[in-house]
Image (tube, rainbow, N blue to C red):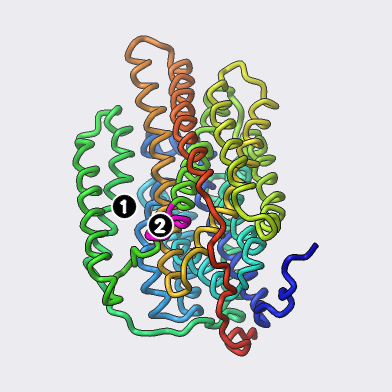
Amino acid sequence: MDTSPNKNEAAQLPPGGKLLIGVLVVAAFVMILNETIMSVALPRLMVDLSITATTAQWLTTGFMLTMAVVIPTTGYLFQRFTLRQVFVAAMTLFTVGTLLAASAPGFELLLAGRIVQASGTALMLPLLMNTVLNLVPAHERGKMMGVISIVIAVAPAVGPTISGVILDALDWRWMFWLVLPIALIAFGIGVGLVKNVTPTSRPSFDGLSVVLSALAFGGLVYGLSSIGHSAEGSSIPVWVPLTVGVVALAIFVMRQIARQDSERALLNMRPFSTPTFTIGLGMLMISMMALFGALILLPMYLQNILGLDTLTTGLMLLPGGLTMGLLAPFVGRAFDRIGPRPLVIPGAMIVSAALWAMTLLDAESSLPMVVAIHCVLSVGLATIMTPLMTSSLGSLPKHLYSHGSAIFNTLQQLAGAAGTALFVTVMSTTAASRVASGVAETAASQDGIHTAFLCGGVVSLVAVAASFFIRRPATDQPAEHVQPEEVRTA
């Protein structure tokens, strides 16, 4: 029986809204795809560029770290500039970064290109989420957030597969040359379609907060990665960047709280006063740590332990990515009907079970077993991503949407970077200690990967406990909409 008799009378997506969101989804998918496209290529890059594993992982961690530094500024940028202006800036940065990476002769310029790419991606993802929150009625948000979860989770999941297919026949630079025309096409179409859907203002710019944000998130992620570097003789004490990050983060948060009453905060902290938002965000961070940790360790396991080539490695990871993509829309529709808890609780348990199953992988594991475990992990992640995003952000009042999405995306990317750094750090330090004790290098690497997955399994238990506290937003009011003529398309 339909329990929503007023559904037809509810606010609807304005004319042109679907096309606008579609353009942003395509652009964001192409950008996020590049977040993990390097993972399968890391072993080859280590040889071609003469770099270590912990150095090579910065091509992924640096991408996510840049996003974590830039995204906190989007709350200000969305108020100051129009949707069209932000879109053009994002696509310009991404296109230039892709060109730099494609033509890079060595690691330094390749990393620079990745950072420029990430700067554009950092603008696009919250832009997409903020647009959906402002345009889509509450009763349809689950379905639309399911589409966004494809961008956030599926794009990075299929990145390794695309990378493996390209590397099987071409040089690693073609991972960027082939993306470049797609980016240009999306840029051209977007310029003709994207119009502004929100009013602009002239808020004060807090440069000190931007610096503190960069020091905070940069210091924390660099510190985590430095633990891995220290195993290879890094001259920088681990406690230095970690201390800088923690202190800068504390000052940053206090400054935002002090300035938010006068509406001058770079990043308003009020969303954290909403329990549904805070718990959902915490669970999503753990999920992103698991996703990106697995995405960087599985290719290393498949190539270094099982001896697979890059093409086979990429194809092995494809079923999981496709599983997540196929499930996301159905999960979104299910959320609109039954709410978050019936989805999030079993989803968190499935993710945890998959991570614990990965601790069983060794040199004798069969390929079907690896694919099956990865698919199980993907099912769990698909089940929790959409409900967590929709219930968390939907629990906020409209005037906090931009800040909530900025916080959500910032900490999500920080969690992905931290997960990557944590898994690689545990793997590297464990393997180094085993080699030092006389264990063969392959066996030592296997022990390192096992310990890293064990760490992920322990962390996942926290998400399982938190899943029981997830609630549907107390007031599920339809979003206020701009007038249809403000969402014109060319």
Q: Number of numbered discs present?
A: 2
Which residue is the site of mark 1? 217
- Residue kind at label 2, given as amino acid type: Thr
Above/below status of 420 relative to 11: above
- Residue 144, x across and y down, in percent: 64, 64
Whether label 2 touches label 1, CB < 8 Å? yes
Q: Disc 2 or 1, which lies upstream in sequence?
A: 1
- Residue kind at label 1, given as amino acid type: Phe
Magenta span of residues: 273-278
Residue depicted at x 70% and y 58%: 337
Residue depicted at x 59% and y 54%: 387
- Residue 101, x across and y down, in percent: 46, 54
Specify the principal SS of the magenta part.
Answer: helix
Query: Mark on residue 85?
Result: none
- Left or right, 78 with reference to 476: left
Query: Mark on residue 410?
Result: 2
Q: Is residue 275 visible?
A: yes
Above/below status of 69 relative to 12: above
Neighbours of disc 1 within 10 Å: few (<14), some (14-19), many (20+): many
Above/below status of 389 relative to 77: above
Residue depicted at x 59% and y 32%: 354
